[in-house]
Amino acid sequence: MKSYTIHFIRNALTDENLEGRYIGHTDVEISREGCDQLVEMKKELIFPPVDAVFTSPLKRCTKTAEILYPDNKPIVIDGFIEYNFGDFENKTAEELEKSPLFPRWLAGEKGVAPPFGESNEAFTKRVCETFEKVAEGLMKTGTTSAAIITHGGVIMTILAAYGIPEYPMHEWLTPNGCGFTVKVNPSLWMRAKKFEVFSEFPYEREELPD
């Protein structure tokens, strides 16, 4: 039975990333540094060709897709948009330290959400339902390789939910422009809704997986 290879790739660096700001739905651009960094990575490392590219609608993801996979027309998926930080949006941890809600939210307390934002439970439900639809679509169409270019929070949530080995979200944190390759085996997916996390991404030239 064939397996399906999916590369999860975090959007390129933004100025707001460097400033430590919580940026979710705000449609910021990738920075000049982020663009240069991505172009250099593409020269030095291996980003294998794929049959399909899926991306969040935000510019920091669509631009990343344009740089990494210029020959693929990306399929924009709204469900892969980053967490909605509500009133915490565009603020740093230092700016939020006086908020009584902030430490409870940061600790992952159930049902706690930023004012006018998403709860962790709502975010997890949204991105997991989106990923399941994409994975099942790949299997139905026989599309055996794909890239999903999205945000750090989305990647961490999906890998924590479905990944083998099983690690908590913070263990799946990835630098900008990088991510993980996973292998979806249809029998394991149908039986347990799990996939194997195969390697970090992109690849060093001497480390290209079979």
Image: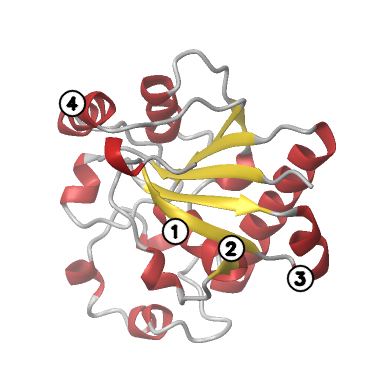
Q: Amino acid at mark 2?
A: Phe
Looking at marks 3 and 4 on the same chain, the residue that comes earlier in the sequence is marked by: 4
Residue receiving disc 1: 153
Is 51 in front, or is 203? Answer: 203
Q: Nearer the viewer, mark 1 or mark 3?
A: 3
Query: What crowding class fits label 4: few (fewer than 14 Cα within 10 Å), some (14-19), or many (20 or more)?
Result: few
- Residue type of the residue flagged with mark 1: Gly
N-terminal of the two: label 1 or label 3? 1
**Of the numbered discs in the image, which one, if any, rests on residue 36?**
4
Check disc 2 and report the residue beneath it. Answer: 123
Amino acid carrying label 3: it is Ala
- SS at mark 4? helix
Q: Are marks 1 and 2 in contact (CB under 8 Å)?
A: yes
Q: Are marks 2 and 4 in contact (CB under 8 Å)?
A: no
Residue 192 is labelled as 3
Q: Tag 2, which secondary structure?
A: helix
Spatial CA span between label 1 and label 3: 23 Å
Contact (Cβ within 8 Å) of mark 2 with mark 3: no
